[in-house]
Image (spheres, rainbow, N blue to C red):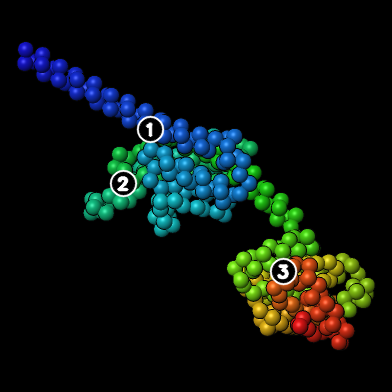
Amino acid sequence: MIEIALILVLVLAGLGLVALTLRARALADERIRSVLAVLGGDTELAASLDPDDVIRRTLEGAAALPGVDAVVLEAGERRELLGTTEEEVSRAALQAPSHRNLRALEVVYRYRLDEAERARNLLRSGLAVPLVVRGEPIGSLNAFSRSAAQGFPRETVVALEQLAARAAPALDNASLYVEARRLADVDSLTGLHNRRSFHELLGREIARARRYERKLSLIVFDLDNFKQINDRIGHLTGDAVLAEVAARVRGVVRESDLAGRIGGDEFGVVMPETGLIDGEHLANRIARTVAERPFGGGHKLFVSAGVAELRAEDDATELFERADDALYRAKKAGKSRTVAAG
């Protein structure tokens, strides 16, 4: 009887263990389904046209999978991390081979006995899944575990593959959209903002300056006598000169400044959080930079500029007109100078 009772206890314990295992697996499956549902092909992940948003959602979705403690997404020059550091990832050195038929690569990290204590917080397993678009790998989605279990549940591997399959085209579409928008906003000759984009940015920065009660100034400048030089050296060479002027301007303006080609040889610079005096200084610095070295063919160019600071009653049109009027006065006064709007 004792033996029968013992057997019954063992059977019941086994059944209980099986039930717990099934319950744990059911919870894991439910967790995976909820993650993939949020990041489904017809929801926000695929619909988003912001690469940063796609990457953030993908990282958060992967980190929510069972057994995952850290995630790294690599695509092109971008590498984004969640739950880990650059130093730790560099030590892990996990990278998915660029094999078209590869589904996933799983590795286990083993540490020396003298590192056993520290190894409790180190990465113990890694899982790399390629991000594939139109049959070509564009990067990888890498998951890491700190668990001593050494490996990922099969459900997590499958879910990470599904997540990568959805994230890759979403990221590609968002990146293509951003690049298309960038090209639509850029002057093809100079690489600066085009006229439409420049005026949109001016309006946006004016609204921001008003909201936070900050200063803002605007420079409008052109190249003295450029039409005569352009007629003499030819339009192709003239275009090369304009491109070089733009390159010199980019080398002078601050990262927060917004430079654009307004049309022909006329340019503008929006300067957030900048008063009139600092705006004049930048305009003069641009003029010196343009004039300090001859352009192709030995031609020297000089700049006339107008500067205006945002007033309480200004809208974008009024601020631009005041800066443009200051440029006109600089021209009328003899060119090669900067005039500040009163």
Of callouts 3 and 2, the N-terminal one: 2
Residue at 79 percent across and 75 percent down: it is 322
Image quadrant containing the N terminus: top left
The mark closer to the camera, 3 or 2, is 3
Determine which of the numbered discs, if any, sits on residue 259 in the image. Answer: 3
Helix, strand or loop for disc 1: helix
Which residue is denoted by mark 2 in the rendering? 110
Residue extending farthest front: 313
Residue under circle 1? 28
Residue at position x 90%, y 74% from top?
Answer: 227
Reply above or below: 164 against 191.
Answer: above
> On the image, which quarter does residue 293 sit in?
bottom right
**Amino acid of disc 2:** Arg
Tell which circle, 1 or 3, labels the residue nearer the N-terminal end.
1
Could you tell me the amino acid type at mark 1?
Ala
Which x, y percent locates residue 285? Answer: 70, 81
Query: Amino acid type of disc 3?
Result: Ala
Q: Position of residue 202 (x, y in %)?
A: 72, 66
- Residue lying at 93% horizontally and 72% vertically, measured from the top left: 231
Point out residue 212 in the picture as x, y percentages from the top left corner.
Answer: 59, 68
Cα separation, mark 1 vs mark 2, equals 26 Å
Looking at this view, name the residue that lies furthest to the left: 2
- Looking at the image, is 5 positioned above or below residue 236? above
* Distance from Cα at disc 1 to Cα at disc 3: 52 Å
Label located before the other in sequence (1 or 2): 1
Q: Which secondary structure, mark 3?
A: strand
* Residue 94 horizontal side relative to residue 294, left or right: left
Name the mark on residue 317: none
